[in-house]
Image (tube, grey):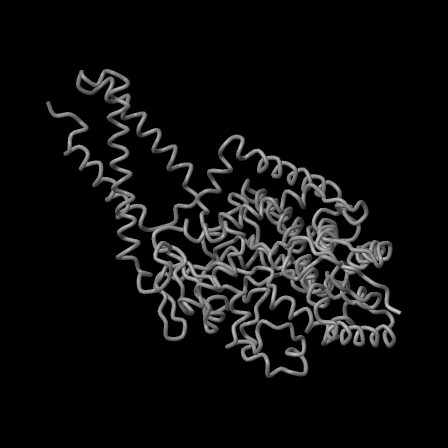
């Protein structure tokens, strides 16, 4: 008697799996459909079991036999789907001509394994470029591109590239940063541009100075003693952005303790760093009980903060004022509009805090290793304080060496070390004389590019003078894009620079800085983590009052 688990039935299931890959899953994006695929698969299997029991041959009236039969055929279908995918990726894929680790062509699990080692993916990718060249296939559909010509081709306003699937990571929240279509991005970016224009920045300046004073008070109280500046610069930047996003401080500078928001955010960013190449996992995490507990808790906390901020409008506008004004001007805001508002509130608090804190920490790390650079900076700052009254954001922005020091910190320790993900247009993209096929994920590894001798002379050295008196050390200034480039560049760049300039100038005016006893450069560098934004381990320093 022929049964449904005989060879013809198994072969049929196998080829159905092959057909699903060729005609369905081979094109388009499926990262957000993880839970739907699992539910649909389970539903189809359950329906097949019931169909066999009640409508099939008599021998399948046994539930156990029906389940066994359907499961067997299902796994043959999965085998056909998997084998077809692996053959296509390994032999016929459009990126097959590009070099890279052999296993990387089959699955993003390879690049994920590199990240999972120490969250030093930026160094792993740099090593791969040294081995394979400017174009490295990191995944089935993903290229890492360390070509100076790629900056304009991929990131500029004239680029036909769009943001890649990574930007679905917060779905269904869609903040400004996560918008993938240019049509939707333009009107929302205009609102944000108003929130960061020159007048708005002047309104924010008193907040920046107030929190800078709180930070200086702590440094004064601990002068000459080791302190973990990684924490305290985080306390500073999160307090500033909490005020500008939600109209209230997290009071971390006041209390000297980590707030729930900062701890939860850093835990989330670690997960993003680990699984940023497996975006299909995130919908699964969000939908699975127990696994999604902290996600739901954080979302509810954020909603409460936004609701409180909406009910208490400040006398002096903050960044969220502009976003909220635009939202409330809508006649009939949709559920997605409400989610977008929540996403934008998160973006304000997150984007300006993590990156600012990392830049300050790395900047003072480099100054501690370069006493001559610190001395030169102190002379420039001292001269400004002697000749200007008041010293404000405008006068600080004119200090060339201060900006040079900031640029060098950003160059050696870019806030987004692995760069921003983009996708090529369907027709493909020419980068110089290299054609990258269409619908390919491309990423410029900023850590690697900023340390490329074709772009910067003595690229691994901290030399602020390359931006002032030794400009010949910058071979291609157009490649220096720590804030990205074009329409999707960092909208809060000027606010972040204001904070970094204020804090740096005020500290070096008062203190000499050095690494604390026992703190080694290697320990700090080993503790850096690539979590999309740069995350840092503790850095213990001593601030000694200047004579």
At horizontal 59% and vertical 66% (from top left) the residue drawn is 482
Q: Nearer the viewer, residue 533 or 390?
A: 533
* Above or below, 175 relative to 467: above
Q: Nearer the viewer, residue 101 or 469?
A: 101
Indicate left or right for 1 with 368 as reference: left
Residue 224, position as x, y percentages in the image: 84, 59
Q: Nearer the viewer, residue 526 or 382?
A: 526
At horizontal 81% and vertical 65% (from top left) the residue drawn is 506
As drawn, the residue found furthest toward the front would be: 518
Indicate left or right for 210 with 168 as reference: right
Indicate left or right for 172 with 541 as reference: left
At horizontal 29% and vertical 48% (from top left) the residue drawn is 85
Residue 6, position as x, y percentages in the image: 15, 30
* Quadrant where the C terminus is found in the figure: bottom right
Residue 400, position as x, y percentages in the image: 72, 76
Q: How many marks?
A: 0
As drawn, the residue found furthest toward the left would be: 1
Indicate left or right for 12 with 188 as reference: left
* Quadrant where the N terminus is found in the figure: top left
The quarter of the displayed image where residue 545 is located: bottom right
At horizontal 41% and vertical 71% (from top left) the residue drawn is 431
Residue 121, position as x, y percentages in the image: 51, 56
């Amino acid at each position: 008697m022929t049964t449904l688990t005989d060879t013809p039935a198994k072969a049929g299931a196998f080829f159905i799996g092959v057909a699903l890959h060729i005609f369905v899953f081979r094109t388009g994006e499926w990262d957000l459909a993880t839970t739907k695929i699992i539910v649909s698969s389970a539903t189809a299997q359950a329906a097949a079991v019931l169909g066999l029991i009640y409508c099939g041959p008599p021998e399948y009236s046994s539930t156990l036999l029906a389940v066994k039969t359907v499961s067997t055929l299902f796994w043959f279908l999965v085998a056909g789907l998997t084998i077809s995918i692996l053959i296509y990726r390994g032999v016929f894929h459009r990126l097959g001509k590009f070099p890279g680790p052999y296993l990387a062509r089959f699955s993003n699990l390879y690049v994920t394994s590199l990240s999972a080692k120490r969250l030093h993916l930026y160094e792993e990718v740099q090593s791969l470029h040294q081995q394979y060249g400017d174009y490295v296939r990191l995944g089935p559909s993903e290229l890492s591109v360390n070509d100076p010509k790629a900056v304009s081709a991929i990131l500029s306003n004239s680029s036909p590239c769009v943001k890649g699937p990574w930007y679905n990571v917060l779905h269904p929240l869609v903040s400004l940063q996560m918008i993938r279509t240019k049509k939707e991005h333009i009107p929302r970016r205009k609102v944000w541009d108003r929130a960061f224009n020159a007048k708005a920045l002047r309104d924010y300046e008193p907040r920046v100075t107030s929190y800078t004073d709180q930070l200086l008070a702590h440094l004064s109280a601990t002068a000459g003693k080791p302190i973990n500046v990684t924490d305290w610069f985080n306390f500073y930047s999160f307090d500033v952005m909490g005020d500008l996003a939600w109209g209230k401080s997290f009071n971390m500078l006041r209390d000297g303790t980590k707030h729930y928001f900062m701890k939860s955010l850093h835990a989330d960013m670690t997960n993003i760093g680990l699984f940023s190449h497996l975006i299909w996992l995130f919908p699964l995490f969000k939908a699975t009980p127990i696994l999604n507990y902290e996600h739901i808790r954080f979302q509810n906390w954020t909603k409460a903060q936004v609701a409180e901020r909406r009910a208490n409008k400040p006398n002096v506008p903050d960044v969220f004022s502009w976003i909220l004004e635009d939202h409330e001007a809508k006649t009939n805001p949709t559920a997605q509009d409400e989610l977008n508002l929540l996403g934008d509130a998160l973006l304000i608090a997150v984007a300006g805090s993590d990156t600012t804190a990392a830049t300050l920490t790395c900047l003072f790390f480099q100054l501690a290793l370069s006493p001559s650079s610190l001395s030169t900076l102190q002379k420039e700052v001292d001269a400004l304080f002697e000749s200007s009254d008041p010293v404000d954001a405008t006068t600080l922005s004119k200090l060339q060496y201060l900006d040079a020091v900031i640029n060098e910190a950003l160059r050696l320790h870019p806030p987004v070390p692995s760069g921003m993900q983009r996708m090529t247009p369907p027709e493909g993209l020419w980068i110089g004389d290299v054609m990258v096929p269409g619908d390919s994920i491309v990423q410029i590894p900023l850590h690697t590019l900023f340390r490329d001798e074709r772009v910067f002379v003595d690229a691994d050295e901290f030399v602020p003078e390359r931006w002032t008196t030794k400009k010949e050390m910058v071979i291609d200034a157009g490649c220096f894009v720590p804030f990205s480039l074009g329409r999707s560049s960092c909208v809060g760049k000027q606010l972040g620079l204001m904070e970094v300039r204020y804090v740096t100038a005020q500290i070096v005016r008062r203190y000499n800085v050095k690494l604390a006893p026992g703190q080694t450069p290697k320990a700090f560098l080993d503790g850096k983590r690539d979590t999309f934004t740069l995350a840092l381990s503790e850095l213990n320093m001593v601030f000694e009052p200047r004579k």
